[in-house]
Amino acid sequence: MAESVYKVIELVGTSTTSWEDAARVAIETAAKSLKDLRIAEVSKLDMKVENGKVTAYRTRVKLSFKYLNE
């Protein structure tokens, strides 16, 4: 097996629907500019509250991608 190097970044996705949707938004947005995404780990969930009501779900995601050997 060849040696590999991975970078881990932290993203925050938001959604008015759910935490799962917020995570999906973060990953799909990152995939537009990063290649070879590997693992996504949810590290934190929170909500935005306004006037006593939940207005947004936020998911913090640690995402790894492989450095390419070119």
Image (cartoon, grey):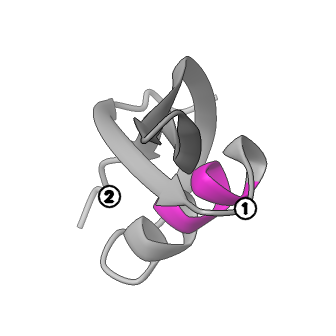
What's the CA distance linking mark 1 and mark 2?
35 Å
Report the predominant secondary structure element of the magenta stretch.
helix
- Residue 8 is labelled as none
The local secondary structure at tag 1 comes to loop
Residue 42: quadrant of the picture: top right
Residue 32 placement, left or right of 53: left
Residue 69: quadrant of the picture: bottom left
The extreme front residue here reads 51
Q: With respect to residue 67, does 44 lie above or below? A: above
Q: Nearer the viewer, residue 29 or 13?
A: 13
How many C-alpha atoms fall within 10 Å of the one at disc 2: few (<14), some, or many (≥20)? few
Residue 15: quadrant of the picture: bottom right
Q: Looking at the figure, which quarter contains the N terminus?
A: top right
The extreme top residue here reads 43
Query: Does the segment drawn in magenta span residue 23?
Result: yes
- Label 1 vs label 2, nearer the camera: 1
The local secondary structure at tag 2 comes to loop
Give the labeled residue for mark 2: 68
Q: How many marks?
A: 2
Question: Can I make out residue 23 in this image?
Answer: yes
| Place of residue 3 in the rendered image (x, y in percent of width and height, measured from the top left) | 44, 27
Q: Residue at x 42, y 32 (%)?
A: 4
Question: Can I make out residue 63 in this image?
Answer: no
The reply to whether the C-beta atoms of the residues labelled 1 and 2 are less than 8 Å apart is no
| Place of residue 31 in the rendered image (x, y in percent of width and height, measured from the top left) | 47, 73
Query: Which residue range is magenta in the image?
Result: 21-26
Q: Looking at the figure, which quarter contains the C terminus?
A: bottom left
